[in-house]
Image (tube, rainbow, N blue to C red):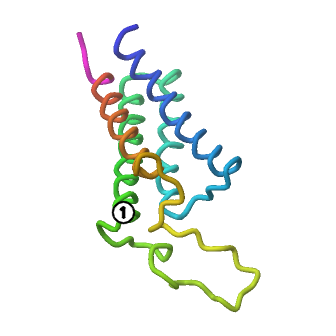
Amino acid sequence: MDNPVKARALAVLVPAALLGGAYVSQYVYGLFPCEMCWWQRYPHFAALALALVSFVAKPARVWVALAGLAVLTSGLIGGFHAGVEYGWWEGITACSKPGAGVDILDFNAAPLIRCDVAPWTLWGISLAGFNFLISTVSGAAIVALAAYRK
């Protein structure tokens, strides 16, 4: 398998797997996404679309490289979100500020999912942290493979 084919395969599989994992954690395990979690999903949707476009549009390398940049973007957002969860810096949304934007008298309001609390960790790494690790490495690999010419 040559590098452009590997890049395209990664550009389809990585965002599909990470989005699949996000939806399984949401609908099977009840780990509902906060606002910053959604920010991480949007670039994966874009990456998946760009990778699929690469099957029909030329030059495929450009579309695959753009998909890789989208995966990398999600990873960087995940890194920011993980930093908020670990308390390294403050978040920029209402979901990371205690009591902000919550009307305690509105009993019909949806519960606020906190951005500064990791609902699940493995080896001390949150889901946002895993997204950072997987997406930055994968995104860089996709871009490198798409750009490499023999």
Q: Quadrant of residue 135?
A: top left
Q: Is residue 102 left or right of residue 90?
A: right
**Residue at the spot x=36%, y=23% of the render?**
61
The residue segment tinted magenta is 146-150
Which is nearer the eye, 78 or 67? 78
Q: Is residue 60 above or below residue 2?
A: below
115 vs 68: above or below = below
Identify the residue position indicated by label 1 in the image.
Answer: 86
In the depicted view, which residue is nearer to us: 52 or 34?
34
Mark 1 packing: few (<14 Cα in 10 Å), some, or many (20+)?
Answer: some
Figure quadrant of the N terminus: top left
State yes or no: residue 32 in magenta: no
The residue lying toward the viewer, choosing from 50 and 114, is 114
Q: Label 1, secondary structure: give it.
A: loop
**Which of the pair 18/62 is nearer the observer?**
18
Q: Which residue is drawn at 56% across and 41% down?
A: 19
Q: Tag count in the figure? A: 1
Q: Which residue lies furthest to the bottom in this view?
A: 105
Kindly report the secondary structure that dominates the magenta region of the rendered protein: loop
Determine the residue positioned at 24% across, 15% down: 149
Q: In this view, does 150 lie to the left or right of 7?
A: left
Left or right: residue 72 versus residue 121 is: left
- Residue at figure coordinates x 70%, y 47% from the top left: 28
Look at label 1 and name its amino acid.
Answer: Tyr
Give percent across and percent down for residue 2.
Answer: 36, 9
Q: Quadrant of the C terminus?
A: top left
User: Does the magenta-highlighted stretch encompass residue 148?
Assistant: yes
Image spot of residue 68 (x, y percent): 38, 34
- In the image, taking residue 101 as reference, residue 26 lies left or right, namely right
Residue 96: x %, y % from top left: 45, 73
